[in-house]
Structure formats: C-alpha cells, structure tokens
Amino acid sequence: MNSPATMLLEKNLREVSMRNIWTIAKREYDHYFISPIAYVVAFMILLTIGIIFAINIYFFIQNAFQSFGQTPDISPLTGAFAFLLVLSVPALTMRLLSDEARMGTLELLLTAPLRDFELVAGKWLGSFLFILTIVVITLVYPIILNFVLVDPGIDQQLMLSSYLGIILVAAAFLALGVGISALFTNQVAAFFVTLSVFVFLWWLIGFPASVLQGSASEVFQYLDMKTHFYNALNMGSIKLADLVYFVSLIALGLFIGTTAIETRRWR
Amino acid sequence: MIQVNGLTKDYGARRAISDLTFDAEQGEIVGFLGPNGAGKTTTMRILAGYMPPTDGTATVAGYDVVEESLEVRKRVGYLPETVPLYSDMTALEYLKFMADLRHIPNSKERAYETLERVNLSDRADSYIGNFSKGMRQRVGLAQALIHRPEVLILDEPTIGLDPAQVVEMRSVIREIGKDRTVLLSTHILPEAQQICDRVLIINKGSIVAEDTPENLQSRLVGSQRVVLRVRGDSDGLSAKITKIKGVRDVDSKPDGSVEFEFAAGQDIRPQVAKTIVQGGYDLLEMRPIGMSLEEIFLELTRDNASGKKSS
C-alpha cells in the first residue's frame, strides 16, 4: 500500500479542500431551485412514486384476505424510483459543466484557486444533495405505510436497504453525468450521451452474461447495474461487492470529469 | 512581479505566441497592445493559470505558473475578455461566491465593499442578467479585485463600453494600479498612452516593440503626413511643394487634394502655407493625418524586417 502511486494519491486527497467543494456544491444546489428543469424532474419523480404507492395500497387492500399476515413493502416504490433516475439524472447533470464552458464561466473557475477535482466533485455533490432532497421527500410514503396503514409496521431493514440502493444508484449516475457533461460544450449533446450510457449500463451490458459461459459470464453479470440494485439492495441484501460496484462508478465519473477539465486547459 | 521568459504556446499546428520575454515591476501598469489574434489573450490566460504554455517559463508574484499554479491564482485577479458572469445570480451573490472560493472571511461584507469600489452598490441585489454591458464589465472587474490581488490581469477591460464608461473604467484602473501590478491588453493606442507606464506591442505572437508610451510615440511618429486641399490647379501646387526643403513623398490624389510627409520635429507647415498663398491658391484645408494602429504595425514589422537584413 506504500507504492509511490498510492502515496501521491493520498497526498492529493489530503490537499483537497472540502471548503472549495462545498462552495461549488452550495451554488449548484441553490441553482436547482431556480431551474425549471429541476422542478419538472422533482415533480415527475414525486408524482410517479405517489401514483405507484396509491396503486399498491389499493391492490393490497383489495387482496386483504390473501395477503393476511404479510407486510406490504416499499420495494415497488424504490424499484420504480431507480428506473426514473435513468431518465431524470441526465436532465439534472447535462448542464453542470458543459454550460460553464459555453458561457465562458469555466475560465473564471479555472483561474480561481480551485483544483479541477474540487470543481468536479463540488458539481457532483450539489446535484447529489438535490436528488437527496427528493429522496427525503419520498420518505413520506414509507412513513405513512409504517405508522398509519400497517399495524406491526413495515420491514424496516428492507426499507433501509432499498433506500441505500436508491442513493447509491443516484450517486453513481450523477457522477457519470457530471463526467460526461465535462466532455461537452453543448448540454443537449451531454444529455443524450449520458442517457445512452445509462441505458447501456442499466439494460444492455448484462446481456452477454446470459449468452456466455463461465467467468466471462460472471464479468458481465458484475458489470450489470440493475442486478446490483434489483437483485441485491432492493431485496434487502447489503453486500460489499455491490457497494464496491457503486463506489467504483462514482470514482470513474469524477475521474472522467477531472480529466476532461484538465484536457480543456491543454487545448 | 511578472517575469516571462521565452513563453511559447501552440494550438495544434498553429503557433499563437512565440518566445515572448518581458517583465513587469510592482506598481507598474503595463499595456499589451496589438491587433486581434496577436496572442494577447493567450499570454494573459497563461499568466492567470488558465492553461500551461508549450514552452518557456513565467513567474507571477514569485510563483511558477505551471508548477505552483494554485499559488499564482491566489495572487492574481483576472478579468477575461468575455466577462464570465452568472446571469441567474445577483451582483452581491456572485461576488460572495467568488469571495468564498478565495476563502475570504466575512465574504458578504467584502463583496459589498468591492461593489462600492466599482460604483455598483446600489444594484447589489439586482440580477446580473438584467445588467448593461458597462455594469457587467464593472462586476467582472469587482470579481478580479475582490481578494485584493498583487497582480491584476485585465483582458480588453474597456471593450464595448460607451465613452463615459470608458473614461470611468480607465480612472478606476489607474487608481488600482497605484500600488499593484496591472497587465492590461487593448487594441486602442490612445488608451495605452493614457493608462500605461509601459507598452508592449505584440504582433503575430511576438513582441515587436517595448517602451514608454511617450518614447514609443516619438519613435513611431518619425514623420508626419499632411493632407492639403486648395481651390485651383493642384498639379502645379504639388510641383511647388516638392521644392520645399524637408518635404517628401508628395502625392496628388485624384480628388484634387495633395498629401505630403515631413520629418517630425521640423514643422514646415508655415512654409507650405506661405507657398500656397504666394502661388495665389485658396487654401481650403490643411490637416495632419494621425497614424493608425495599422500603420504603426506596418511600420514596426517593416523595421524588423529591414533590421534583420542589415545585421
């Protein structure tokens, strides 16, 4: 663990200023509240989750006799939430760095005493806090379920695991979105590339796993993003392999973003 | 304060600046004068820590712009040519954001003070998106001043302003430049003469002249060109004028006017006037033609070429 590379990494990480990251994140977070697209995304997520919640409750009550003794759980809600993130995160991240480049304000940030990584991480943190706000609002549904509708309460460990899953999926998507946004000057281009990458990671990359055999199959199985959510966290299992997967994606996204910004300087 | 040595920058195959060497002392206002595309912005971006040079070194406030870029950026205030502003923020919010990025304590008070300094405190809570060009320029300047930097780099600070705003901006810059180093770029010759202690003329990525504005002017304006308009036979007149001592390069224009040149320092206009009157012509106009920046550049590049030949 004491190779020169790790020592260099440690030195760089120690020098990173949380204060700078926070300044950027705060500005970005505030910006979402004056941005129509952020309200549209928040409205879409909250409305869809609300409708799914109502439908679930309706069916649960209709089938009350069959489901006697079972507790309703919230995995249908979080499952739909993850799908909504595929569609909405590109809209939240597309302009984060591409618009700075287009408006020329990137020049301001790149001549401020701010490391490139701090800029990218701050943008990511700001968007993450916005998604986190939406996630916190959706907590009303499980709370209603737990305290108002179901007598013994819901499976709280499953709820924690599912929500952790949502937060990790959002964090990984946002990091990739920020990274891709740094590659573009046009936010529409950033949107579609981000969406394509998400579709690929979420639905397509796992496909070879069902065709191939042996270890090759396992590799693609591991790369498949939705299995790390639907077949693990959203079913109540918190395993290190899944956590490592999401944290790696976050690191990859921030690395792409930082490298893209550094490359802009050299051009 | 600023030391530049052999600075070179290539964009792909195109060389934007080549082998620039100059320096600027503390408390000096240095003007970068040159046409568009001469390499002014590139040089300033390198000095502000925006991008690294291809070759050569530059130190600002004692720190290398590549190796210690963050230290340089802490000490430099930079106003880019396209003023980088967030139109969704108020002037005060924007300056507070910049002050926070620079770790200034009591950032809000400092932001307000800086707005007062550029005479915008009455618009502190207005959105930048509604600002006029001149106000935007002032917010941009406030952003460059907010951390009271040792070195200020201003890229075309007066471009796009109306005449009153230009005068105001110039006086602000002169005021600021009393105790810090200012490097500013412009393509307006009188502006460089008014503000700067020293002028660097840059063309096609190289410095072609460097001097105080006064010296530069007397060097450049080695000859004065005059246009003359009379009623009557102008061809006969140009023959008479050619005979006057000191006159050279006489040229009869198709529109009937006559142009000639004489060496600066020996004004022969009275003799010319006498000749005209004695010849019985009615003098309509006698007007010196100022040398445009373009002519100065032509002059300077011509000097360079001939200098190389002779050496």
Image: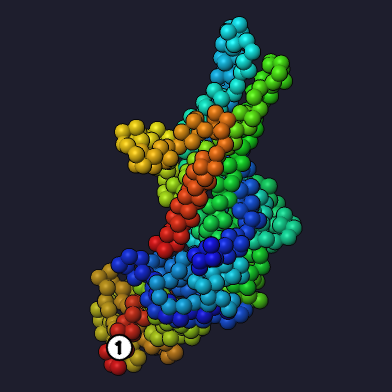
Q: Amino acid at mark 1?
A: Lys
Where's the C terminus of chain B, which quadrant? bottom left
The answer to which quarter of the image holds residue B239 is: bottom left
Q: Is residue A237 above or below residue A184?
A: above
Residue A5 location (% of width, % of height): 49, 65
Which of the pair B181/B18 is nearer the observer? B18
Q: Which residue is mark 1?
A: B308
Please, which colouring scheme is shown? rainbow
Where's the N terminus of chain B, which quadrant? bottom right
Which residue is located at x 52 percent, y 80 percent? B3
Which residue is located at x 55 percent, y 48 percent? A123
Residue B200 horizontal side relative to residue B272, left or right: right
Which of the pair B31/A112 is nearer the observer? A112
Which of the pair A31/B177 is nearer the observer? A31
Disc 1 element: helix
Which residue is located at x 43 percent, y 86 percent? B219
Residue B95 location (% of width, % of height): 65, 55
* Furthest-front residue in this view: A214
Q: Is residue A129 above or below residue A80?
A: below
The 10 Å Cα crowd at callout 1, few under 14, some 14 to 19, many 20 or more, is: few
Any part of residue B169 in sight: no
Which residue is located at x 49 percent, y 77 percent? B58
